[in-house]
Image: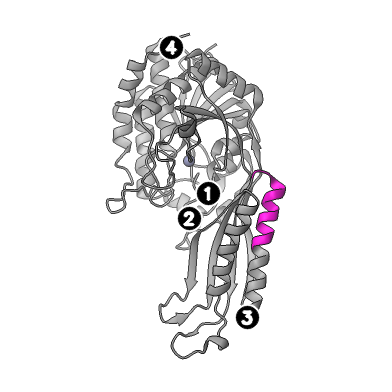
Amino acid sequence: MSIVSVDDAANTWKLPSWRSLLPVGADAQTGGYRRFSFTPADSQCRDWFRLEAVHRGLRVETDRNGNLWAWWDPEHARADSEVVVTGSHLDSVPDGGAFDGPLGVVSAFAAIDLLVKARVEPVRPVGVVAFTEEEGARFGMACLGSRLLTGAVTPEAARELTDADGVSLAEAMAAAGLDPEAIGPDPELVGRIEAFVELHIEQGSALAGMNAAVGVAESIWPHGRWRIDFNGRADHAGTTKLADRSDPMLPFAATVLAARTVATELKSLATFGRVAAEPGAANAISSAVHAWLDARAPDESTLTELVSQVTAVAALSGSSHGVTATSTCESLTPAVEFDLDLRDRVLAALAGQEIEAPVLATGAGHDAGVLAAAVPAAMLFVRNRTGVSHSPAERAEPEDCETGIIALAAVLEELACR
Ligand SMILES: [Zn+2]
């Protein structure tokens, strides 16, 4: 089987679709992206998606949860026909890279282009999806769009999520012209999805070490976010004796160091990437410190152990400083094992293009991980030259992206065109 040549793919990579998306939400100062859900940058990303779909004659829909769908369905399949879906997300973390998310959406459109050019037609509809709020950068819950679609979060809980300015998801959706009362699971659509394949830049350097352009996901580590609130007493930095202080910054600092030690011992990952001090004055002892722990581990019992050890240090260190420490789990995603049969079909399709793809586990969450609970799901990873992600330094080489597009086209041909 040879559906495309490398030359075709090289041309694909230079198509305007990537270049026209590139400036949207870019921050001139940091070089990173700020594409937060239901903001003007997000709305421009959505316009880009619609334009790309219409330009290819694909049918565009926005579902009740704000996820965008473009359907390649030249045979006008029955409304209850099984479908194959690919795609990713267009939102970003604060100052994220260009590839995390958009690479999967751009590659999905480009893969369809390759198949069309090769006169390969789908026998069941192929959907390109862009999920809303995958990063959770605005409302704090990762993979919100795919969780709502599959029922992994209730509409009530989702509507009450708020951003840093206190704007609720319901308010933000209404302002963007969507109906927040309509959000919720769509078992009919989910039930039709025969396979979901997400292409994504690798968020580490495993493929670089294996000299492979593309990899296939085996599993996603269980992971979650915990907010730890350290409450002490505000006072004057110049007049309060050290012995008289209830400074929440001290147990916070001890907890950060402990998280590193415990994660090392348990061969896991623990990160404090967000912290807020109140009142936040340089010459005042804080009244409170709010910190967010991101924890990931190879299995669920190790994750539980990691978080319980870290929160125990927070409580113990807090009590020695006259500070209370309470932790709240904000999100928890169980371990994901991707569908074995689908993975074999993906690997076979790649082998048909002479693409050797190692099988990898990852610590990063994805919409494919959420979908995997409901439908057969698979992931293709594209090598990341820097190994860095969630940063402007994230980078995938054009030739690796081309291999990714060829790989995805071969997978879509295998799943939807036979
Ligand atoms: Zn992503």
Real-space CA distance between mark 4 and mark 3, rounded to the nearest whole angstrom: 67 Å
Q: Residue at x 41, y 28 (%)?
A: 107
- Which callout, 1 or 3, points at the residue further toward the start of the chain? 1
- Residue mark closest to the camera, 1 vs 4: 4
- Which callout, 2 or 4, points at the residue further toward the start of the chain? 4
Give amino acid for label 3. Gly
Q: Which is the main secondary structure of the residues drawn in magenta? A: helix
**CB atoms of marks 1 and 2 within 8 Å:** yes
- Which callout, 1 or 2, points at the residue further toward the start of the chain? 2
- Residue 66, position as x, y percentages in the image: 49, 41
Q: Which residue is mark 1?
A: 180
- Residue 109, position as x, y percentages in the image: 40, 26
Range of magenta residues: 298-310
**Disc 1 residue: CB within 8 Å of ligand 1:** no
Give amino acid for label 4. Ile
Q: Residue at x 55, y 75 (%)?
A: 248
**CB atoms of marks 1 and 3 within 8 Å:** no
* Numbered badge on residue 322: 3
**CB atoms of marks 2 and 3 within 8 Å:** no
**CB atoms of marks 2 and 4 within 8 Å:** no
Q: Which residue is mark 2?
A: 171
Give amino acid for label 1. Pro
Q: Which structural element holds mark 2?
A: helix
Q: Which structural element holds mark 1?
A: helix
Q: Residue at x 41, y 9 (%)?
A: 119
